[in-house]
Amino acid sequence: MIDLAKLAAIPDPPSIRTAAVERAIADSVAYLGSDAAQQSLELDPYWPKWHSPWWHMLLLHELGEARQIPESAAASMVAGLDRLLHIFPIHPDDAPGADVHRDIACHCALGTMSSVLAATGIDVDRALPWIKPWFVRYQIADGGLNCDDAAYRQTAECPSSMVATVAPLEAMLLGEAWSNEQRAFVDRAARFLIDRALVRGSQTVHNAEERSAEAGWRALAFPRFYFYDVLRGLAALVRWAETTEQSLPHAAIATVVEALVERWPDGVVRVERKAHAGRSTILPTVDRSPSPRAPASTFPLLEAVSIIGEPSEALTRQWSAARAGVLRLSRAGRLIVA
């Protein structure tokens, strides 16, 4: 059982942002306003990882600084997304001739960038009206999604992915003017996280790899980009329950909340995992010629905020908000014990 008294007693720490992070934020903002960033966006909105506008924008958003993103970069990102196919091809003949890396978005990418653009002040529903229907269209029967097209060709099981589900859910929760289909999407995606108790990987054959990844989810990562950890899942579920005024099963969050209370008794959350480390990227080319994979590059802000063992302002803020939400749900009688 969650010890609500102990949860309530955890203090909200003061700001722990350092001067080095402030300088790195300024560096990323300056980069996003540069000709180099505009040229990168015109070439490809997503690639390469990690030193390109997509990742600078996403990291600024995770730090609560999306309003510093230059309007020119946000507008170019909208245009870049709109150039991509407005479908997620499942069968080879769905998008003949398309480049699977350069022409096609995935669910977690659209979810994360939708949230970024909304935080800059863009009306995403007006600018990119195809994104929310996309999430509804590609939701699997168990409430999740999967960025692996082969998952949709499985007929004997539902191999949904936590990574592919949490970002679309976060994006959908930013607005409350949902259609009936969109409201159903939100509730089904939340139930997917509830059924997994935030910590369990897929039990399917097709997505067996996720069971190997689940152990890592308990170590909090920063930045997340599109990656999953249990605090990210907890924050999404609490927001869902409060936004939709629904009850949240105690069992769905107890394991995670109890572990976080024990690990961070002073309220300060430290980086435990670099989910972005060791990744590779493609390098976009003007003539769209094939690109070999290369090690993903980095940039000063990414380096400054991802030091393992260091306090994380963003994770600390998210844990504080999630704690407050859990306590409000409890007081309202909506944290239920089955």
Image (cartoon, helix red, strand yellow):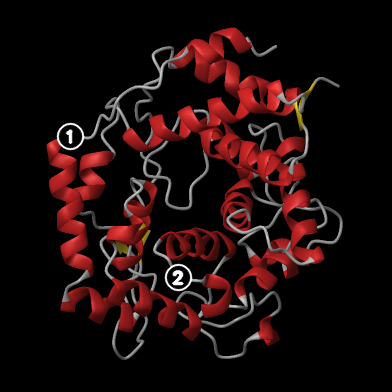
Amino acid type, callout 1: Thr
Which residue is nearer to you in this view: 4 or 272? 4
> Is residue 74 shown left or right of residue 38?
right
Q: Counting other residues with Cα less than 10 Å from the Cα at mark 1, is it few (<14), some (14-19), or many (20 or more)?
A: few
Q: Mark 1 highlights which residue?
A: 18
Give percent across and percent down for residue 333: 77, 24
Mark 1 or mark 2: which comes first in sequence?
1
**How many angstroms separate mark 1 from mark 2 (CA)?**
29 Å
The answer to whether residue 140 of the structure is visible from this angle is: no
208 to the left or right of 143: left
Asked whether 58 or 50 is in front, the reply is 58
Q: Which corner quadrant holds the N terminus?
A: top right
Between residues 7 and 193, which one lies in front from this camera angle? Answer: 7
Which residue is labeled 2 in the image? 122
What secondary structure is marked by label 1? loop
At a point 39% along the width and 29% down the height, the residue shown is: 316
Q: Position of residue 57 (x, y in %)?
A: 33, 61
47 above or below 316? below
What residue occupies the far front of the structure in this picture? 332
Q: Residue 304: x percent and y percent?
A: 21, 41
Left or right: residue 287 versus residue 130 is left
The amino acid type, in three-letter code, at marker 2 is: Ile
Which residue is drawn at the image coordinates 69% and 74% (left, top)? 90
Residue 176 position in % (x across, y down): 67, 58
Q: Say what secondary structure mark 2 lies in.
A: loop
The vertical placement of 242 against 120, above or below, is above
